Image (cartoon, rainbow, N blue to C red):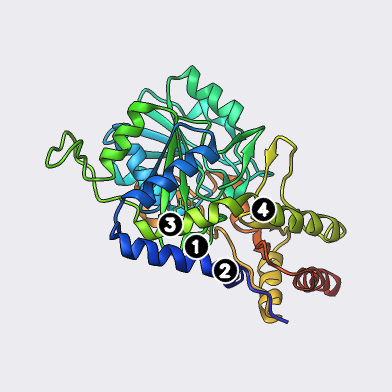
Amino acid sequence: MTVPLLDLNRQHESLLPQLRQVFEEVTRSGQFILGEYVQRFERELAEYCGVKHAVGVSSGTDALLVSLMAMGIGSGDEVITTPFTFFATAGSIARVGARPVFVDINPRTYNIQAHDIQGAITERTKAIMPVHLYGLSANMDAIMEVAKANDLKLIEDAAQASGARYHDRPVGSIGDVGCFSFYPTKNLAGMGDGGACVTNDDDLAEKLRQMRNHGADRADHFPSIGGNFRLDGYQAGFLSVKLPHLDNWCDMRREHADRYGRELEEVAITTPFESQNRHHVYNQYTVRVRGKGMRDGLRHHLEAHGIGCRIYYTRPLHLQPCFADLNYAPGSLPFAEEAAGQVLSLPAFPEMTTQEQDDVISCVSDFFLAE
Ligand SMILES: Cc1ncc(COP(=O)(O)O)c(C=O)c1O
């Protein structure tokens, strides 16, 4: 048996005629950078998210970076975020010259512990950057409350959470700006790099548009220094083909999660947190395996049987060598550190077959029976 962690070919096979048509149209139009295909996708994404503006950019990383730049966050400022996320979250904060301030996670949801944010705020704090990890919304009511009370900007890192909702609001539409990634492993998967910022703030949207294009507000006129963070026409066109399928793909992931939840109930793992108020879209279906060596044992067992699985993430960001000068000691953010030793993501991509899921379930169960 072999079960991949993700197989995009299955998605692309059924969409191939439309994708081919986009390729031909964009090629004929010559609109390779920004242009009408990007504008169309931006309108569609804004509508999907229920916001006024979407600004297509070159990646999820650049969506974060350009948001910080557009808000004027930089040297001497602090931005509060989670240590248990992909590198780009904190990397983008550091790249604008600001200091990432890490607040530990909730051990059940793996998202930033909202109630600990207040204690990390100083007079230098400018923004909070929560991450909706694995496709599960962070505790946005509590985070918005602390952001409002302290007059802080709220930048949602929704890179892993296209399609997720908090109560009835699409993630990304809740804070001042929401940042999406269309990296091919994401729920809305581009065919290359891509990302977007969404916002209801007209001035911020204008600034984001300028910043993604070197800071220009018109031809050859640069009120501020931005960069080249532009989305290209092919990606936008491909994403327009895929966006109408996003909710269905998320529902399929949710069905797989449901089944895992039922079938793995008796097994000594912790399945993901679920709540009616947080529409989880399982960009990763991540279980927790306690006990010394057990997580790595399960990983090796699955890999030996041809089942794709991966650890997101093995080392929290406060312990990354590049952040040594921030002076976080091992043990300082214990919930993130413990999670890094215990999480494992299993296949849950939309097109995974029942047989494939059966194989994953029996392989996981066998591992624990053999222990
Ligand atoms: C939480 C998070 N933030 C940011 C990013 C960066 O997105 P990209 O790879 O599109 O630059 C990713 C994904 O890679 C991510 O998972």
Distance between the Cα atoms at labels 1 and 2?
Answer: 8 Å
Residue matched to label 1: 184
Vertical order, 290 against 103 (above or below) = below
Q: What residue type is labelled 4?
A: Asn
Residue visible at 67% across and 53% down in the picture: 248
Q: Which amino acid does label 3 sit on?
A: Gly
Mark seen at residue 237: 3
Distance between the Cα atoms at labels 3 and 4?
Answer: 19 Å
Q: Nearer the viewer, mark 1 or mark 4?
A: 4
Q: Which amino acid does label 2 sit on?
A: Leu
Q: In the rendered structure, which disc, 1 or 3, sits on the residue that comes first in sequence?
A: 1
Disc 1 and disc 2 in contact, CB within 8 angstroms: yes
Q: In the rendered structure, which disc, 3 or 2, sits on the residue that comes first in sequence?
A: 2
Residue visible at 25% across and 51% down in the picture: 228
Characterize the local packing of mark 1: few (<14), some (14-19) or many (20 or more) Cα atoms within 10 angstroms.
some
Disc 3 and disc 2 in contact, CB within 8 angstroms: no
Q: In the rendered structure, which disc, 1 or 2, sits on the residue that comes first in sequence?
A: 2
Vertical order, 232 against 120 (above or below) = below
Characterize the local packing of mark 3: few (<14), some (14-19) or many (20 or more) Cα atoms within 10 angstroms.
many
Give the quadrant of the N terminus.
Answer: bottom right
- In the displayed structure, does residue 297 sit left or right of residue 312? right
Residue matched to label 4: 248
Q: How many labels does the image show?
A: 4
Q: Which of the pair 323/332 is nearer the observer? A: 323
